[in-house]
C-alpha cells in the first residue's frame, strides 16, 4: 500500500494513472482529432504526478521562474475569451501547482498560513484588487491596455501562490543545492545567448543564426533589441538574473569541488561582461551594491575589508582608463552619459507627485497611471515629446504611490520590510560555517536578490517583470520556511549538516 508520509508509490498512484489512461482513451476514441496530443498530455500529467510523489517538488518553482527566459514566445499561448490567456509559462505554473498538490496529498500535509510575509503579500493583492474593481481592470490607453490585470496576475497573484507552495514544501537543507545549481545551469544558456546578441549588435550579422529559439531574434518581440537581453523580452530581467548569477557562483564555488567548480570559476569571469552587454546603468549600480553586501556579510573578518578595498581600487582604475567610453551616450560601447532617460524620470517624478496630491489615499487606480497623466492638464513637456519612456512610470514605489495612494505604498514597503526582517532573524540563528548549504552565506545570497530587486525598482516598474518577482518571492518562501523551523526550536545553530534542526 501507499505509505503516507514516505515517498513510496503503489496502489493509489496506479489507480489514478489507470483512470487517466481510460479517460484519455475514451476522449481519443470519441474525438480522433485529439490524437496523438491527448496521449502526450497524458504522459505529461503522469510525469507531474510521479514527480509530486517521488522527486524534489520545489524544483517546479524554478522551472516556472526560468520559463520566462525559455518559453516566452508570443505565439505559444491559448486565447480564452473573457479569461486570462494561458501562455506556455502559465501552463508550467499550473503543472507545478498539480505537482505540489500531489506532494501535499500523499503526505497528508495541511498548508500552513503562518507566514507574515505571505499575509503582507496577500494584503497587497487585496489592495490592488479593490483598486482595480473601483477604477477598472483594463486601462483606457491602448498602449497599456493590460496594465492593471496583467501586472496583477503576473507579478502579484502568481508569486503569491508560489510563495505559499514553496513555503510549505521547504524543510530540508538539501533543497538548497537543487535551487542554486539549477540557477547556474541556466546561466550557460543565458551567457551563450548574451554573447551572440552583443556580437550581432556590434556588427557580426551572422551571430543571430546560432540563437535558439528563433523568436528571440524577432525585433518586434519585447524591447531592447539593440542590447543583449538574453532570451527575455527586455534587458531588465536579463541584467537582474546575471547580477544574481555572479554571486550564486561565488556561493557554489565555496561548496563544490571538481570539474564543476572550475566551470563555475569560468562562468563567474564571463558574467560581468554580459552585465555590461545589457546596457543598463541600473544593473551596474545593482552589481556594485550587491558586491558591498556580499563582501560585508558573506566575507570573513579582515578579508571582507580587503575585498572591498580591492574592488574600489579596480573601479577607480577602470573609470580612469575607460573614461572616454563612459562619458559618451553610446551604451553599446560603455557610455553612461545618456541624458534623455534621466530627463524623462524627472518628468515622471513630477507627474507622480501631482497625481498623488490629487488622490493621496487610494491613488488613481492600480494600472491607471498612464490614463491619469494623459487626462490631467498638467504637462511639464510639449505634447509632441511624449514617448513610452515618459508615459510609463519607471519607479516601483512612485508608481504605487500614484496608483494606489498611501495605502498601497505603505503595504508595498511593509512587504519588503517584513521579508528583510525575517531573513535577518534567520541570519542571526544560522552558523557561519561555509561548508553547509544552510548557512549565513545562503541568507546573504537572498540579500543580494533583494538588493538587486530594490535597486532595479528605483529605475523601472518591477510589476511588469514576472521573472524578477517569481525569483524574489520563491526565494523568500525558502527563507521564511527555514526561519519558521528555527523559530519553533530553541536549539542553535538552526540546521545540522543533514538539514534537520540541531538537537531536534
Image (tube, rainbow, N blue to C red):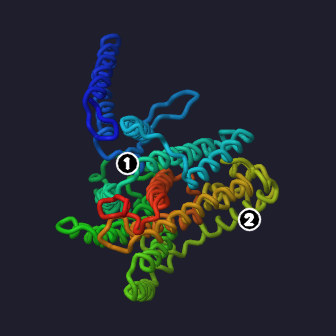
Residue appearing at x 32%, y 20% in the figure? 19
Residue drawn at point x = 51 percent, y = 67 percent:
425
- The residue labelled by disc 1 is 58
For residue 243, say whether it is visible.
no
Q: CA distance from mark 2 to mark 1?
A: 43 Å
Residue 350 is tagged as 2
Q: Quadrant of the N terminus?
A: top left
Crowding near the residue tagged with mark 1, few <14, some 14–19, many ≥20 C-alpha atoms within 10 Å: many
Q: Nearer the viewer, residue 194 or 37?
A: 37
- On the image, the x and y values in percent for residue 197 come to 35, 59
Near mark 2 (Cα within 10 A), the count class, few <14, some 14-19 or many ≥20, is some
93 up-or-down from 200: above or below: above
Circle 2 or circle 1, nearest the eye? 1
**Residue 268 location, quadrant:** bottom left
How many discs appear? Answer: 2
472 left or right of 204 in image: right
* The quarter of the displayed image where residue 245 is located: bottom left
**Between residues 156 and 4, which one lies in front from this camera angle?**
4
* Residue situated furthest top in the rendering: 30
Spot occupied by residue 88 in the image (x, y as percentages of width and height) = 41, 39
Contact? badges 2 and 1 (CB < 8 Å): no
* The one of 453 and 220 positioned closer to us in this rendering: 453
Of all residues, the one furthest to the left in this rendering is 258
Query: Which residue is pictured at 39% across the width and 88% down the height?
Result: 302
- Per the image, label 2 sits on a secondary structure element best described as helix
Amino acid at each position: 500500500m501507499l505509505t503516507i508520509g514516505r515517498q513510496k508509490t503503489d496502489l493509489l498512484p496506479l489507480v489514478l494513472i489507470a483512470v487517466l489512461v481510460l479517460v484519455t482513451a475514451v476522449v481519443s476514441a470519441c474525438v480522433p482529432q485529439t490524437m496523438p496530443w491527448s496521449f502526450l498530455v497524458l504522459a505529461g500529467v503522469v510525469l507531474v504526478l510521479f514527480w509530486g510523489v517521488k522527486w524534489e517538488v520545489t524544483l517546479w518553482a524554478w522551472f516556472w521562474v526560468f520559463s520566462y527566459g525559455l518559453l516566452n514566445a508570443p505565439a505559444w499561448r491559448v486565447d480564452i475569451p473573457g479569461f486570462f490567456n494561458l501562455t506556455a509559462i502559465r501552463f508550467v505554473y499550473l503543472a507545478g501547482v498539480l505537482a505540489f498538490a500531489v506532494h501535499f496529498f500523499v503526505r497528508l500535509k495541511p498548508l500552513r498560513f503562518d507566514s507574515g510575509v505571505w499575509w503582507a503579500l496577500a494584503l497587497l493583492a487585496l489592495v490592488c484588487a479593490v483598486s482595480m474593481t473601483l477604477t477598472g481592470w483594463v486601462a483606457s490607453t491602448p498602449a497599456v491596455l493590460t496594465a492593471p490585470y496583467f501586472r496583477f496576475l503576473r507579478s502579484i497573484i502568481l508569486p503569491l501562490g508560489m510563495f505559499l507552495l514553496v513555503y510549505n514544501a521547504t524543510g530540508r537543507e538539501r533543497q538548497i543545492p537543487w535551487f542554486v545549481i539549477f540557477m547556474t545551469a541556466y546561466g550557460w544558456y543565458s551567457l551563450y545567448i548574451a554573447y551572440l546578441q552583443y556580437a550581432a549588435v556590434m556588427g557580426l550579422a551572422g551571430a543571430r543564426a546560432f540563437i535558439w529559439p528563433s523568436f528571440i531574434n524577432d525585433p518586434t518581440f519585447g524591447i531592447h533589441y539593440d542590447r543583449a537581453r538574453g532570451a527575455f523580452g527586455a534587458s531588465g530581467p536579463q541584467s537582474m538574473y546575471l547580477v544574481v548569477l555572479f554571486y550564486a557562483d561565488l556561493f557554489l564555488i565555496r561548496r563544490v569541488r571538481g570539474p564543476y567548480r572550475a566551470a563555475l570559476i569560468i562562468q563567474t569571469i564571463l558574467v560581468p561582461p554580459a552585465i555590461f552587454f545589457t546596457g543598463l546603468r541600473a544593473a551596474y549600480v545593482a552589481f556594485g551594491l550587491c558586491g558591498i553586501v556580499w563582501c560585508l556579510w558573506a566575507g570573513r573578518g579582515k578579508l571582507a575589508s580587503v575585498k572591498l578595498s580591492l574592488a574600489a581600487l579596480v573601479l577607480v582604475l577602470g573609470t580612469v582608463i575607460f573614461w572616454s567610453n563612459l562619458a559618451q551616450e553610446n551604451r553599446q560601447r560603455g557610455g553612461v552619459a545618456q541624458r534623455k532617460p534621466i530627463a524623462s524620470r524627472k518628468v515622471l517624478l513630477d507627474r507622480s507627485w501631482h497625481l498623488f496630491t490629487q488622490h493621496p489615499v487610494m491613488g488613481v487606480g492600480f494600472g491607471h497611471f498612464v490614463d491619469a497623466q494623459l487626462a490631467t492638464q498638467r504637462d511639464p513637456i510639449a505634447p509632441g515629446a511624449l514617448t513610452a519612456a515618459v508615459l510609463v512610470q519607471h519607479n516601483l514605489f512612485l508608481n504605487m504611490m500614484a496608483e494606489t495612494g498611501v495605502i498601497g505604498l505603505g503595504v508595498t514597503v511593509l512587504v519588503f520590510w517584513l521579508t528583510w526582517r525575517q531573513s535577518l532573524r534567520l541570519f542571526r540563528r544560522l552558523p557561519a560555517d561555509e561548508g553547509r548549504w544552510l548557512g549565513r552565506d545562503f541568507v546573504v545570497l537572498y540579500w543580494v536578490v533583494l538588493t538587486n530587486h530594490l535597486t532595479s525598482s528605483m529605475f523601472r516598474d518591477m510589476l511588469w517583470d514576472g521573472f524578477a518577482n517569481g525569483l524574489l518571492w520563491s526565494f523568500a518562501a525558502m527563507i521564511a520556511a527555514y526561519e519558521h523551523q528555527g523559530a519553533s526550536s530553541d536549539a542553535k545553530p538552526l540546521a545540522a549538516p543533514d538539514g534537520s534542526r540541531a538537537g531536534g
